[in-house]
Amino acid sequence: MTSPVHLIGANGRSGLAIARALSAEGETIIPVIRAPEKLPDDLRASARVADLEDSRTLAAALADATRIVSTAHARFIPAILDAAPQTACLIALGSTRKFTRWPDAHGNGVLRGETALLDSGRRGMILHPTMIYGAQGEDNVQRLAALLRRLPVLPLPNGGRSLVQPIYQDDVTRAVVAALALATSGQITGPESLVIAGPRAVSYRDFIKAILTAAGLGKRVFLPVPGKVLEILAPLSARLPGLPSIGRAEIRRLLEDKAFPVTPMTTRLGITPIALEDGLARLFVASADTTPLANGPRP
């Protein structure tokens, strides 16, 4: 019989999906969380209270851990490694934001977490997903669809030629479960880092077209706009009612190609990610809620 899985971030979008998947496979879940009241009833009973910024409570919660999964921001990996037993394995989520040419706190935190794991020599894997869509409450595609409902003309940086490679939440969940299975069976003997992504990169323009189709929104007029112009205009978005606030750094990241080979993912984890069109179809069938939210899509 395998030991329980200590799950950090069980109340988050990916965390809850992973908890459900592991429970379906007969795993015992011990959520490690600051606010257990945010958990569903079936997970709350076994939860342990800990603050990732409080080494004492975190060490107490992980004292008997042998298998840890963390969906918290990767910047907390050093604290988790310090608090966990040396023999415990760690499967953590990072982000492909680490590759950006426009570093920010998010990307730099991912790099610090990855470095901590790789330098530790500990058994584990940090998985770096591209933009995740399809989780319950996910606010990338849904918020973008809400914005598309309002705009008959869509300004796209440099015509939307930059590449994106979104990954469906189910594939993220399967990747984490597969990585944990490798660690449990002894097939992970040291620290590893792996990018997980959708099956192929598409232009941002084609990504928008796929969302329009899946959401039944019809066609839109695309207006190519130089990236530099949008950077200058970005601060004005906060002043326009009904539009999300978009910063200059977000515009710059929209101009970056985000394309990654998936062979390492399929070879190491045995997972073939689903096509973007199939994932979007599932998403919009499962949820018709495209209520506009406060912020725009996160590139």
Image: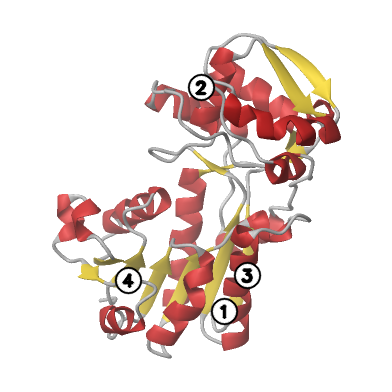
Which callout, 4 or 3, points at the residue further toward the start of the chain? 4
Which is in the foreground here, disc 4 or disc 1?
4
Q: Is residue 242 above or below residue 246?
A: above
Q: Is residue 203 left or right of residue 247?
A: right
Q: Which residue is mark 3?
A: 193
Q: Is residue 33 above or below residue 208?
A: below
Q: Amino acid at mark 4?
A: Asp
The quarter of the displayed image where residue 229 is located? top right
Q: CA distance from mark 1 to mark 2?
A: 38 Å
Q: Which residue is mark 2?
A: 146
**Secondary structure of residue under mark 1:** helix
Given contact means CB atoms under 8 Å apart, are the residues at marks 2 and 3 in contact?
no
Q: Is residue 63 left or right of residue 175?
A: left
Q: Is residue 226 visible?
A: yes
Q: CA distance from mark 2 to mark 4?
A: 34 Å
Q: Amino acid at mark 1?
A: Leu
Front residue (pair 12, 247): 247
**Secondary structure of residue under mark 4:** loop
Q: CA distance from mark 3 to mark 1?
A: 9 Å
Q: Pointer 2: residues within 10 angstroms few (<14), some, or many (20+)?
A: some
Residue 222 in the image, given as x and y percentages of width and height: 76, 16
Which labelled disc corresponds to residue 51?
Answer: 4
Q: Which residue is mark 1?
A: 117
**Secondary structure of residue under mark 2:** helix
Q: Is residue 267 visible?
A: no
Q: CA distance from mark 4 to mark 3?
A: 25 Å
